[in-house]
Amino acid sequence: MKILKNFIVEGKHEKPIVTDVFYKETHQPKKVVVFCHGYKGFKDWGAWNLMAKAFAEVGFFFVKFNFSHNGGTLEQPIDFPDLEAFGNNNYVKELDDLESILDWISNNSDFKNEIDINDISIIGHSRGGGIVTIKTAEDSRVKKLISLAAVCDFGSRSSTIGDLENWKKTGVKYVLNGRTKQKMPHFYQFYVNFKENEERLNIERSAKKITVPHLIIHGNTDTSISVEEAKKIHSWNPKSTLKIIKNADHVFNVSHPWEKEKLTKELKEVTKTCIDFINNN
């Protein structure tokens, strides 16, 4: 298996999009899968590397990346050394980053014998699930959509509500990262950018426009994002497939760091469900 880690894809917002690819070198075109991490996430969180290997083992070309402003750097792509970047992140930048990855896949000559640019699926976890839903509605290059424990509404998240008067006055509000104990900033630009792009960032509107195969996966013990949000997304696109994973939390019972050599039972079920869905649609 070929694993290329931490190379740069140029984006639109000055900071690098640090990227990995996993594939078996066969000189035959493969279905492409692009994975988007969630809020306070990164491409190497938990067992995402094991999941990437599982996709590559069965013949996919798997791409995962850090959003340019997720707080990671090329030198330290894990965790959040660049809190200034984190504070300047927003949903539109994440959509632009995903578009840059799709552009890179479509135009890259290094892997032209290994990828089928006409068969691209995108997977998003949590906040990334909202991002991939919007991007699929916008971009005809995406042929299949999968969301994992996805949000159904950006407007009701803590990132876009709260004490707006104080946020505007101080220019920043902070969220504690329970794992790293960092006070992670959200600069007021996040709210301004959301309001300026509120129609585009409406996940319900996007879900109703989806015409490609659409899989929604959620754990029934998710305390971060209720399974009811998955049911809402499914109701907006009745042609979608809804899969509830029993006894699975928001991250399918994985934690970080993940030093075990196997996926959890729940994430293994998620991975198999995704692979079967992409192969059969």
Image (cartoon, rainbow, N blue to C red):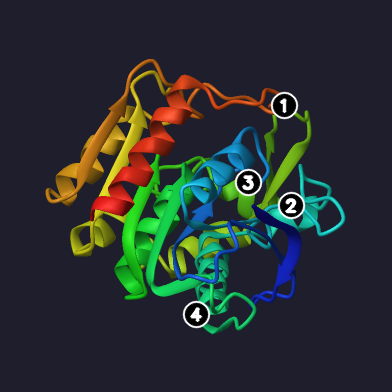
Q: Quadrant of the C terminus?
A: bottom left
Q: Earlier in the sequence, mark 2 or mark 1?
A: 2
Q: Mark 4 and mark 3 in contact (Cβ < 8 Å)? A: no
Which element type, helix, strand or loop, lies under badge 3?
A: helix
Q: Residue at x 78, y 35 (%)?
A: 182
Residue 161 is situated, as x and y percent measured from the top left of the image, at 48, 44
Alpha-carbon span between mark 1 and mark 4: 37 Å
Residue 53 is situated, as x and y percent measured from the top left of the image, at 58, 44
- Image-quadrant location for residue 178: top right
Alpha-carbon span between mark 2 and mark 1: 15 Å
Dot 3 crowding, Cα within 10 Å, few <14, some 14–19, many 20+: few
Is 132 positioned to the left or the right of 253 in the image? Answer: left
Alpha-carbon span between mark 3 and mark 2: 24 Å
Which element type, helix, strand or loop, lies under badge 4?
A: helix
Dot 1 crowding, Cα within 10 Å, few <14, some 14–19, many 20+: few
- Residue 236 - label: none
What kind of residue is marked 3?
Asn
Q: Earlier in the sequence, mark 3 or mark 2?
A: 2
Q: Which residue is denoted by mark 3 in the rendering?
A: 166
Residue 259, above or below 193: above
What kind of residue is marked 1?
Arg
Residue 280 is situated, as x and y percent measured from the top left of the image, at 24, 51
Q: Which residue is denoted by mark 4 in the rendering?
A: 106
Q: Which residue is denoted by mark 1 in the rendering?
A: 179
Q: Mark 1 and mark 2 in contact (Cβ < 8 Å)? A: no
Alpha-carbon span between mark 4 and mark 2: 27 Å
Residue 130, above or below 226: below
Alpha-carbon span between mark 3 and mark 4: 44 Å
Question: In this rendering, does residue 61 appear at all?
Answer: yes
Q: Which residue is denoted by mark 2 in the rendering?
A: 71
Q: Residue at x 57, y 49 (%)?
A: 165
Residue 229, above or below 140: above
